[in-house]
Amino acid sequence: MTPLNPSPHLLTDDAAQNKPPRRFRVLMVAPTSFFSDYGGHIRILEEAYTLQELNQELAIVTYYKGSDMPGLDVRRTAPLPYRTDYEVGSSRHKLAFDVYLAAKTIKEGLRFRPDVIHGHMHEGALIGGMLAKMLHVPLVFDFQGSLTAEMVDHHFLNKNGRFFAIAHRLERFITDWFPDAILTSSIHASEVLQQEFKIPQERIHALPDCANTTRFDPEKFSTEDKNQLKNQLGIPLDRTIIAYLGLMTDYQGVPHLIETAVRLKAAGEKAHFLMMGYPNVNHYQTIAQTRDVADIMTFTGKVEYRDAPLYLSLGDIAVAPKMSTTEGSGKVLNYMALAQPIVAYDSPVHREYLADLGTYAPLGDINAFTESIQSLLHNPAAQKKQGENLRKRVIEKYSWQHAGRQIIDIYTDLTA
């Protein structure tokens, strides 16, 4: 994998005043195959690079699989003797992975002696929280969505089943007992913690996902570069490209995009769908062929984060059909950074990021989603204006510069 350089654009208020922030030893616990090119991994990666650029000493404990990113101190578990791969999403195998991760975290914690433990997701909060109590240091919980809601989204748990109540009680215990502070990826997630899990407001800090606006900059990619990639992917140059980058799963709305393609083709629209992500690529390609839209849908498979800005820059319109109402939706921030107009299902998280600058359809309404895309297809001026306004918004409100400073302020308060 080609090395990915850390974000070069950070400059905090303290740095501007020649006053470096206090230096902490931070042990991050990431219960996933870090780094992989999707979702919450981007948040972990950018947070880690940001904190290092702000003079923090950082180590990340994670599963044995994943890509080693340049400049990061990543400490991996031993591989399981009976399982050499890992499925994206909820899986019964994660229980064994997390046992190994707990042992590795304790070992590295005793060796590293952190000032703060930063646990990502609920397993990271549980494992990191046990170590934090052993070492008498604070735990910061990076909350990226409800554990039980995600398990339902992945069809790993039935909301009406007998195990849902047990899982929900476990989630409530983790969320309430261990963290000294909770970072949420959206304001909506903060509200969920207060209303559903009764977490005091003073322990919750909204830290929405951010965008690297230097890497995701539309001015970086020439028409020649983009046309070359289109030819490589077999995409006609005379089509409006509708771009999606993310996990290929039902709850992300991929079947809805296939149905939208069916309706746009029937209407005679000159649009082409660029579908970037994994897993289940062959499954959705087969559905597209069955629905007779394989000719207007290109499935790239996995796009590594280093290549994502160029691939995503091909889009004229970006789409966010995610069905979950509790998880973050960080992909829309990269769409915004690339000055792309966005058609999204109307959810609290999308409203938080896009405000009134997005084009919305009611959640799950494929007909309205299709009509929203059509309205932009026939109005290039609206496309351009919306895209420009969204890039301006992401630069002003969703910068890793501000997020990094906020995280260090929380560390400082907890260790004071």
Image (spheres, rainbow, N blue to C red):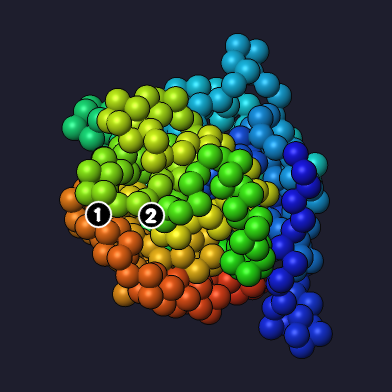
Q: Residue at x 41, y 77 (%)?
A: 385
Q: Which amino acid does label 1 sit on?
A: Phe
Provide the secondary structure element on which disc 2 rests: strand
Task: Report if the CB atoms under discs 1 and 2 are less than 8 Å apart.
Answer: yes
Relative to residue 18, is residue 176 depicted above or below?
above
Relative to residue 100, is residue 74 depicted above or below?
below
Q: What residue type is labelled 2?
A: Val
Q: Can residue 57 be seen in this view?
A: yes
Place residue 109 in its image quadrant: top right
Q: Residue at x 56, y 37 (%)?
A: 302
Which residue is label 2 attached to? 319
| Image spot of residue 42 (x, y percent) | 58, 51
Of residues 118 and 332, the one nearer the viewer is: 332
Q: Residue at x 63, y 69 (%)?
A: 219
Q: Residue furthest bottom?
A: 17
Q: Which of marks 1 and 2 is nearer the N terminus?
A: 2
Q: Which residue is drawn at 55% across and 75% down?
A: 395
| Image spot of residue 259 (x, y percent) | 26, 40
Q: How crowded is mark 2: few (under 14 residues within 10 Å), some or many (20 or more)?
A: many
Relative to residue 256, is residue 409 depicted above or below?
below
Which residue is label 1 attached to? 369
Provide the secondary structure element on which disc 1 rests: helix
Task: Report the disc number at residue 225.
Answer: none
